[in-house]
Amino acid sequence: MARIFLIGYMGSGKTTLGRKLATRLNYQFIDLDHVLEEQAGMTIAEYFASFGETAFRVAESEILKSTAYPENAVISTGGGLPCFFDNMEWMNVNGITLYINLTPKALISRLGNNKDDRPILRDKHGDELLAFITEKLEERNAFYLKANIIADGLSLTAEKAAALAAEKTEL
């Protein structure tokens, strides 16, 4: 098999699924958000606050393209990473992309308890939060839907993700 890049909106389960999938496949797991935090010496929220979104997107893209990935790796990406520069195309050339697709309502139920860790959502509630996520998801789907694999996030397990990835590499 090849490297597997997990993409999807924040709260879609990229890190959780990524760890389980990597364990199942006996692959290394890499969370690009954690790589960025380690290299920057601060959290993503702090990076956003200090440097702004544009600088964050540039740093995120540089980390995506400069990280030395082993051949057998599952890589969890930031929710916006596929939507900037040529990041989506780069991932499709350098591995298999798997989009964890969830509805805005499913995302809200997952994000509800840890919005403080996500600066972009911190002050949004109820209908405003639903409208924001719906709008962002519509914008990002143009990129997310370029993934090699599009999977229903509600029923996706590490076993199903492994089977989908294996199927894709056999083609």
Image (tube, grey):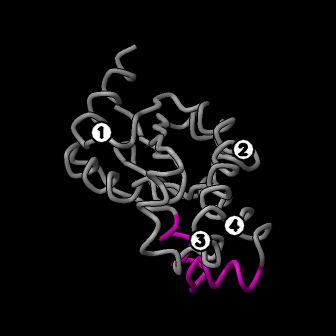
Question: At 63% across and 53% down in the image, what residue appears?
Answer: 81
Q: Which tag is nearer the camera, tag 1 or tag 3?
A: 3
29 vs 48: above or below:
above
Mark 1, residues whose alpha carbon is within 10 Å: few (<14), some, or many (≥20)?
A: few
Q: Is residue 84 left or right of residue 107?
A: right
Q: Magenta part mainly helix, strand or loop?
A: helix
Q: Are marks 2 and 1 in contact (CB under 8 Å)?
A: no
Q: Which residues are magenta?
A: 33-51
- Which of pointers 1 and 3 lies earlier in the amino acid sequence? 3
- Which of pointers 2 and 4 lies earlier in the amino acid sequence? 4
Q: Which residue bears the numbered disc 3?
A: 125
Q: Which residue bears the numbered disc 4?
A: 59
Mark 3, residues whose alpha carbon is within 10 Å: few (<14), some, or many (≥20)?
A: some
* Residue type at the position of mark 2: Glu
Q: Are marks 2 and 3 in contact (CB under 8 Å)?
A: no
* Residue type at the position of mark 4: Ala
Q: Are marks 1 and 3 in contact (CB under 8 Å)?
A: no
